[in-house]
Image (cartoon, rainbow, N blue to C red):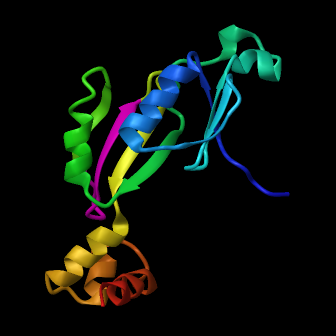
Amino acid sequence: MKYQMPVLAVRDPEVSKRFYHDLFGQEVALDLGRNITFTGGFAIQQDFDWLVGIPKSTILHQSNNMELYFEVDDFDAFMDRLHGFLDVELVHPPRMCEWQQRVVRLYDPDWHMIEVGESMTVIAQRLLREGNSVEQTAQLIQHPAAFVEQCRKDME
C-alpha cells in the first residue's frame, strides 16, 4: 500500500485553486473540475459528500482538527505577501515557538487550517552563523544533532 495525499472538501474549486496558487505558489498537477490535485501533494474536492456518500450536513465547517503545513525560507516575505490577501482570516498572528520557529496559522476559503512556518533548515543555519555549536543549535531547535550537522554541511 502507498499513501497518496490528503483531500480537502471545498465548496468552489476555482476559488480554492486560485487561493492555493496565488498565496502558496501551488501548481495544478491534475484538474478534473470537481477534483484538483496540486504538485505540493494534496487535492481539493467539490461535492465531497456526494463522492463518499454521506449527508452534506456532516461536512464540518472550521473543524480545527487538522492543518496543512508549509515551510518557507523567507518568513518575512511570506508575511508581506499574506498582507495582500485582505480576506484571509488568521487563526493567530505570527508567533515564535519554543523551538525558535516563527509560525502563522490561517484559514483557507473553506476554513481549513493552514500553518506556515519558517524553514527549520534556515533557522538552524542562522543559529550556526550566529556562532552556536551544532549541539547548542540542536538543543535550541529541538532537532537531532544529525539534522543540524547536515544543515551545517549544506552551508559550505
Q: Which residue is rendered at x = 29% and y = 69% of the image?
A: 122
Hey, which quadrant is residue 121 in on the image? bottom left
Q: Position of residue 5 (x, y in %)?
A: 67, 46
In magenta segment, residue 14: no
Q: Does residue 5 appear in this view?
A: yes
Q: Position of residue 145 (x, y in %)?
A: 40, 85
Q: Which residue is rendered at x = 67% and y = 23% of the image?
A: 33
Q: Which residue is rendered at x = 46% and y = 48% of the image?
A: 69
* 123 shown above or below 66: below
- Apparent side of residue 53 relative to residue 151 in the rendered image (left or right): right
* 36 shown above or below 102: above
Camera-side residue: 114 or 145?
114
Hey, which quadrant is residue 42 in on the image? top right
Camera-side residue: 25 or 100?
25
Residue stretch rendered in magenta on the structure: 96-107
Camera-side residue: 134 or 139?
134
User: What is the quadrant of the N terminus in the image?
Assistant: bottom right
- Apparent side of residue 39 relative to residue 53 in the rendered image (left or right): left
Q: Does residue 62 appear in this view?
A: no
- Apparent side of residue 131 relative to residue 35 in the rendered image (left or right): left
* 63 shown above or below 81: above
Q: Position of residue 156 (x, y in %)?
A: 30, 91
Q: Which residue is rendered at x = 34% and y = 53% of the image?
A: 117
Q: Position of residue 14 (x, y in %)?
A: 53, 22
* 153 shown above or below 110: below
In magenta segment, residue 103: yes
